[in-house]
Image (cartoon, rainbow, N blue to C red):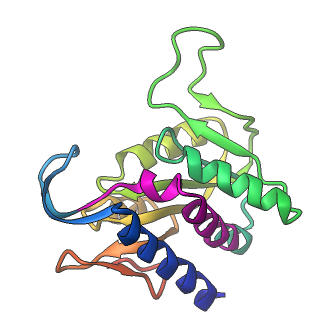
Amino acid sequence: MSRMKDSYAESILDLAKETGALRFGHFELSAGGSSSYYFDGRLVTLHPKGGYEIAKAILSALKECNAEAIAGPSIGADPIVAAVMVLGYVQGEHIPGILVRKEQKQHGGKRIIEGNVWPGARVAVVDDTCTSGKSLLHAIDVLESQGCKVVKVITVLDRNEGGSKDIRSRGYDFFTLLKADKLGQIVTCEDKRETT
């Protein structure tokens, strides 16, 4: 199974380079600081092949942890959640999606969560990238406040800037397809549970 996930990661990395989602140079980051590369996760997650490859890899991970639903912070997780739900359905798996807003809506149903949640649900939380981990941790906190059990945290790219370390330190199983190494290069992960 690990070899299969590696091949998905290699395909996703190749696509990121082909589409210009992964560029090298000097970039200022919205989370603060600068980087020798820029990864636009949406160019990969909103690409038909990218969405498909990511969904295949994540479905494999969901089976390993017996997740009953997939959730993530809106807007980075939106295409990932949708791709996993649809591919899962095609393969005979019923995996509902949940999106967590940054803030509670001020109108309509005034929800912070979109989708159905239930106490005790085993949920995997996903996002396209992990830098500080704040959006992932926010989603986790909101889901847990509704009684969900977070069984895995998954990203397409771990920037290795402290977020994944913080997530692990809180006791969560963290999985990523791609990671930034110490030289600032983007590489596939041989062991999806380790990103250092």
Q: Furthest residue to the front?
A: 18
Residue at image position (43%, 82%) is: 189
- Which percent across, then down, holds residue 171? 48, 63
Residue at image position (54%, 36%) is: 142
Q: Is residue 184 left or right of residue 117?
A: left
The magenta segment: 38-60
Residue 128 lies in the magenta stretch: no
- Indicate whether 105 appears above or below 156: above
Query: Which part of the image, by quadrant, shows the N terminus?
Result: bottom right
Query: Which part of the image, by quadrant, shows the C terminus?
Result: bottom left
- Which percent across, then down, holds residue 176? 47, 70
Q: Main secondary structure of the magenta part?
A: helix
- Indicate whether 114 appears above or below 32: above
Q: Is residue 8 left or right of residue 166?
A: right
Residue 52 lies in the magenta stretch: yes
Residue at image position (45%, 71%) is: 15
